Image (cartoon, helix red, strand yellow):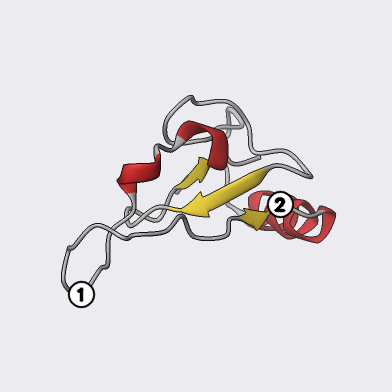
Amino acid sequence: MPKCLACAEPIKVGDKYYNDVSGDLIHDKCTADDSFVDLETEAPLTYRPTPHVWTQQDQDTEDADAEALPTTATGETIQ
């Protein structure tokens, strides 16, 4: 289960979120209105983008990807 970049709480089914430029996810509730910029010009956006909603399909895909990762003899995930 992915965790929010800002609060480290899990992103759960039904949560609103954004993709961060780092590749991580961040809850909608953890972002400030002035934290959105145009990636080409770096100018602040004059609007708040519509967030994505984490779905059961997203969670199922995340779970399947996690199960596919190789592990060590002690069960630690190798990434």
* Disc sitting over residue 54 in the figure: 2
Earlier-in-chain disc, 2 versus 1? 1
Question: Which residue is rendered at x = 78% and y = 44% of the image?
Answer: 13
Q: Secondary structure at mark 2?
A: loop
Give the x, y percent position of residue 23. 40, 56
Question: Which residue is rendered at x = 58% and y = 55% of the image?
Answer: 51
In the rendered structure, the answer to whether residue 61 lies left or right of residue 5 reads: right
Question: Which residue is rendered at x = 49% and y = 60% of the image?
Answer: 49
Give the x, y percent position of residue 39. 25, 68
Q: Amino acid at mark 2?
A: Trp
Q: Secondary structure at mark 1?
A: loop
Give the x, y percent position of residue 5. 43, 36
Whether residue 44 is visible to the viewer of this picture, yes or no, is: yes
Nearer to us in this view, 14 or 56? 14
Q: Amino acid at mark 1?
A: Glu
Give the x, y percent position of residue 41. 16, 71
Reply above or below: 3 against 53.
Answer: above
Nearer to us in this view, 8 or 52? 52
Q: Quadrant of residue 72?
A: top right
Quarter of the image with the N terminus is top right
In the rendered structure, the answer to whether residue 37 lies left or right of residue 73 reads: left
Q: Residues within 10 Å of mark 1 (few under 14, many from 20)?
A: few
* Disc sitting over residue 40 in the figure: 1
In the rendered structure, the answer to whether residue 59 lies left or right of residue 22 reads: right
Q: CA distance from mark 2 to mark 1?
A: 26 Å
Whether residue 77 is visible to the viewer of this picture, yes or no, is: no
